[in-house]
Image: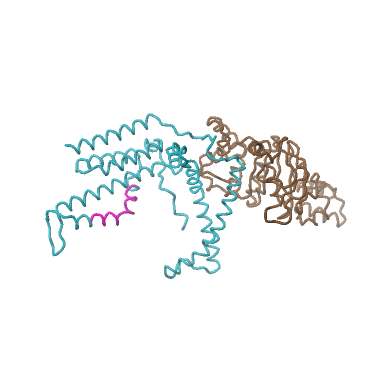
Amino acid sequence: MLRDITVGQYYPGNSILHRLDPRTKLIGTFLFIIVIFMVKTSPQYLLLGLFVLLNVFLSKVPLRFIIRGLRSIVFILMFAFAINLFFTPGTPIFRLWRIRITHEGLRLAFTMMMRLVLLIMGTSLMTLTSSPIQLTDGIERLFSPLKRVGFPAHEVAMMMSIALRFIPTLLEETDKIMKAQMARGADFESGRLLQRARALVPLLVPLFIASFKRADDLANAMEARCYRGGRGRTRLHELRYSSRDFLAFLTLAFLTAGVYVLGII
Amino acid sequence: MIRLENVTFTYMDDDFPAVDDVTLHIEEGSFVVLIGHNGSGKSTLARLLNALLIPTHGDVWVDNMNTKEEDNIWEIRKKVGMVFQNPDNQLVSTVVEEEVAFGPENLGVEPEQIEERITKSLEQVGMSSYRKHPPHMLSGGQKQRIAIAGVLAMEPRMIVFDESTAMLDPQGRKEVLETIKALKKKDMTILLITHFMEEAVFADRVLVMDDGKIVMDGSPKEIFSRTEELHSYQMEFPEVIDLANTLRSAGMNLTTDILERDQLVTELCRLL
């Protein structure tokens, strides 16, 4: 049952979005988020919506994968919608006892929901088209100028990638320990929340101890292979910007300009 | 290649040394097997060879470089590669080719050259077709072969296998041993640490360790004929040799140099 858990939500492919430099995607997503919060009018939303749909089309990721990302925030969406709908002051258009819906409220509720939907679609498009390794590489390179002021960019990226590497190993181990405990009569599935939490203790303790052993072994193995931090290290796949990335930035620039112009009119 | 001079190592909280006054010389291109029961100090000895541990007393020399000198450490580790016991705990990356690249990356090798080294080392361990696979989906034996490829990509002169077959199933052990034998043919210096005595059969030289000391040292034939002594160091005999010894003591006229099954079969056929 634990095997079903996947890390990240990478959808392997070879589309133009997949081949973009992860740095471009990280910066691009960041810009996109800023733009979303600048948007106020419906034509602007229309433009952004079209932009997201275009990217979805380009990524060749099936739409249901992106919709799936939205499912997890349905509750937040509904909540934000309701709050804005019922509690915005302005010209009332509907009134029933103490509940009243205003023109402004309706508008705000819709724009807020659009904003969240676009936000989630845009960001999940990034994680769907970049593997976790690409993302950690991108983060390392983006933050490496900060090394000068003491930010451990390489170490942080190394930690992230080792964590990713060991997730399947630890899941497997958890499964094994659970079965071993169940064979001796442990019960992980029934009882109240507190009881179930308590049942996890005999699972977590061996897992924790084993992790320390693994960390020690891995440190030895890395040192034996001459690992000594990021200094003087080369990379097999050096990240390089290409014309694709230039094109992506250009598109984003046009999008921002478009949103700005539509805002003035 | 490697010289140990009166090497003693004591772990910090221990009263007794794990390696006790060992003097040893391992020659270039030789295939040495080190056997001994659990806690005899084998793994500690291995870690002294590539400066993962520094001797408490005495000196370890790798190509005339002392492991005590801080400046030599990386050069030594480049020369003496090491494959560990647990296949899961020594793999760093989520893709096979990145795993093999890890060592050369640390050495600052140029990307195009790393590419070549990956191709070459994966070929040597017979895992070329798994280049883009995630290592955690592979079998234990395959993972160990990837670990070997990772060491080979650093182009070492010697590889130390620290019980690298201990956690594998029989199939995995066979795969790894075949890989090691292929490396031997290419003149790699090999130190294989194990508690499976049958793995010692292929060696040029067998060392037996007990209580931190090297207690026996000789060719496989020589070592395996010293039955009583081996038993006193709690070593289990390989089945074939055990059978040959039993037959001999039952009065059969077998030659003393039987190490492998085929030899025993030929010998028995001769007697019939």
- For the C terminus of chain A, the image quarter is top left
Magenta span contains residue A74: yes
Q: Main secondary structure of the magenta part?
A: helix
| Scheme by which the image is coloured | by chain
Q: Which of the 4 image quadrants contains residue B78?
A: top right
User: Where does residue A198 sit, x and y in percent of width and height?
Assistant: 48, 67
Side of A98 relative to B15 (left or right) = left
Segment tinted magenta in the rendering:
A66-81
Instruction: State the residue in front, B13 or A247.
Output: B13
Up-down: is B13 above or below B51?
below
**From where the camera sits, is residue B59 visible?**
yes
Q: Nearer the viewer, residue B94 or B53?
A: B53
Pinpoint residue B33: horizontal percent, then vertical percent: 73, 45
Residue B130 is at least partly visible in this image: no
Residue drawn at x 51%, y 58% is A174
Identify the hue of chain B. brown
Q: Left or right: where does residue B223 sit relative to residue B154?
A: right
| Magenta-span inclusion, residue A192 | no
**Total numbered labels placed on residues in the image:** 0
Q: Position of residue A229 (x, y in %)?
A: 54, 40
Query: Which quadrant of the figure has residue A76?
Result: bottom left
Task: Relative to B39, say whether A43 is above or below.
Answer: above
Q: Colour of chain A?
A: cyan
Q: Is residue B199 left or right of residue A228?
A: right
Task: Give whichever of B182, A89 is nearer the camera.
Answer: A89
Image coordinates for residue B179, horizontal then vertical, percent: 65, 41
